[in-house]
Image: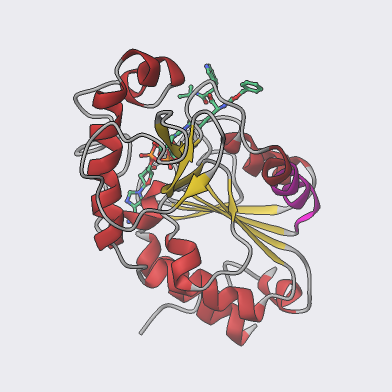
Amino acid sequence: MTPDLRPELPVLSAVRQGAPLVVLTGAGISVESGLPTFRGAGGLWEGSRPEELATPEAFHRDPLKVWRFYEWRRGLVRQAKPNAGHLALARMATLAPRMTLITQNVDELHRVAGSPDVLELHGSIVSVRCTAEGTRTRPTEPFTELPPYCAACGALLRPDVVWFGEPLPEETYRRARQASLDCALFLVVGTSALVAPASGLALTAKDNGARVFEVNPDKTPISGLVDGVFRGPSATVLPAIADALEAA
Ligand code: BV8
């Protein structure tokens, strides 16, 4: 039996009536889909530094090393399925008249779970972009050779993600920031809140009057700044929040 979270989240009744809800997710929401996070034990960055694998400089210096890292992750993502946390957010989108889902994740699991109109701040690892033409493709099979080259023009292909030092997609980030300014309730789920500018959105919401709650089994730099914390895995907490929204 999931706990009744309505007492912790009285604002859910306003959300049910149309007060804007924003949810920001990070790698933690995909842990229960079998995908590793970036930081912490067993994380993707463990053993190598992000600067060696997730920057334009790293790609320019050693495209093969970077592609080996991304092709390994693309293989994990191909096997991954949305978990109860992703599905709960998709359900909440049918219950909250005004909900914006923002993600830092590149695994597209929110789209697969059925969430409409996901704001993907850091792009998608499923998508691949030509470094010369900018054209995007979505190969479903592993590349036969790495690094891969564009069939049309012969230029190097790259993962269609935002690397450190690269700007976020402008319109996507503008929409995410506007939604954070306007919302009544902001849920920050499964993120270490270390990567800007995504990490600033929760405080933007708080500074503009929203109630902000964190869903994370561990403490983060913003745990002390939010209105409340659900210290648990998102695959357990988010279904309980969705149930409370439905009953609100
Ligand atoms: C930009 C690539 C400007 C795709 C990623 C110095 C200080 C401050 C900022 C900076 C600085 N120097 C540089 C910067 C800016 C920089 C930045 O923030 N650096 C940080 C590291 C200091 N940011 C940028 O460069 C951004 N761009 O600012 O551009 C600009 C403007 C104009 C023109 C040019 C430039 C670009 C940022 C995007 C970088 N790309 N990834 C990929 O390979 O995936 S970031 C990477 O970290 C991922 O995208 C990921 O989404 C992101 C955040 O990580 P999290 O999602 O939080 O994951 P993490 O592992 O950290 O945490 C997981 C959490 O889950 C934990 O808290 C854990 O407790 C929790 N958890 C575990 N299990 C569960 C759980 N939660 C719930 N349930 C569970 N079961």
Q: Which residues are magenta?
A: 174-183
Residue located at (35% from left, 56% from top): 30
Residue 239, placed above or below residue 21: below
Residue 244: x percent and y percent?
56, 79
Q: Dominant secondary structure of the magenta stretch?
A: helix
Residue 42: x percent and y percent?
19, 39
Q: Is residue 163 left or right of residue 134?
A: left
Whether the magenta-drawn stretch holds residue 175 is answered as: yes
Residue 193: x percent and y percent?
49, 36
Residue located at (63% from left, 63% from top): 117
Residue located at (60% from left, 86% from top): 247
Residue 231, placed above or below residue 193: below
Q: Residue 150 sits in which quadrant?
A: top left
Residue 213, placed above or below residue 204: below
Whether the magenta-drawn stretch holds residue 61 is answered as: no
Residue located at (23% from left, 33% from top): 68
Which quarter of the figure is the N terminus placed in?
bottom left
Q: Is residue 24 left or right of residue 217?
A: right
Residue 208, placed above or below residue 246: above
**For this rendering, which residue is in front, 45 or 227?**
45
Residue 195: x percent and y percent?
50, 31
Which quarter of the figure is the C terminus placed in?
bottom right
**For this rendering, which residue is in front, 115 or 2?**
115
**For this rendering, which residue is in front, 105 or 244?**
105
Residue 244 visible (yes or no): yes
Q: Is residue 204 left or right of residue 24?
A: right
Q: Residue 118 sits in which quadrant?
A: bottom right
